[in-house]
Structures are given as structure tokens and as C-alpha cells.
Amino acid sequence: MDAFVDQVLTDGMERVRAEGDELRRRGLLDSEGNLLAKELPADMKEGADRDFGG
């Protein structure tokens, strides 16, 4: 069971690192992992007229 857990954690960390690299490539994170884009899209702002299709 320990080998399985180790493999799951290793694979998970690889995915997290890959996602972080992608966010950095897109300019959303800096080199330290801090969020650069803090502005919400217009449809997510308070009082926006939006439809979630539901």
C-alpha cells in the first residue's frame, strides 16, 4: 500500500507542477506561484447580467 500511495503522490505532484508551469506560461502566475491576474472577467463581477444555462 505504501508504494501505491507514494506513486499517487508523485503523479499528483507532477500534475500540479505541470499546471503551474502552464499558468506561468500564460502569464497568470509569477515565478514564485503568486497570482498576477486579479481582475475578474466582466461576467463574474457583482451585478453582471449572466446566464449559466441552467
Image (cartoon, rainbow, N blue to C red):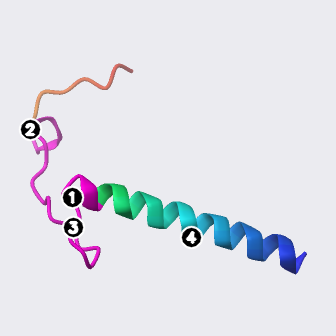
At 56% across and 70% down in the image, what residue appears? 13
Q: Which mark is residue 43?
A: none
For the residue carrying disc 1, how many other residues have a C-alpha within 10 Å: few (<14), some (14-19), or many (20+)? some
Q: Distance from label 2 to label 1 (Cα)?
A: 17 Å
Question: Label 1 near label 2: C-beta < 8 Å?
Answer: no
Q: Which mark is residue 13?
A: 4
Report the residue that reaches farthest toward the right.
1
- Specify the amino acid type for callout 2: Ala
Q: Which mark is residue 42?
A: 2
Question: Label 2 near label 3: C-beta < 8 Å?
Answer: no
Closer to the chain start, of discs 2 and 1, is 1
At 21% across and 58% down in the image, what residue appears? 28
- Specify the amino acid type for callout 4: Met
Residue identifier under label 3: 35
x, y percentage for residue 7? 75, 70
Tag 4 secondary structure: helix
Q: Distance from label 3 to label 4 (Cα)?
A: 19 Å
x, y percentage for residue 43? 14, 35
Query: Looking at the picture, does residue 8 appear above or below residue 46?
Result: below
Closer to the chain start, of discs 3 and 4, is 4
Magenta span = 24-47
Closer to the chain start, of discs 1 and 3, is 1
Question: Label 3 near label 1: C-beta < 8 Å?
Answer: yes
Q: Nearer the viewer, mark 3 or mark 4?
A: 4
Tag 1 secondary structure: loop
x, y percentage for residue 30? 20, 71
From the viewer's side, name the closer residue of 8 and 43.
8
Q: Distance from label 2 to label 4 (Cα)?
A: 33 Å
From the viewer's side, name the closer residue of 1 and 53.
1
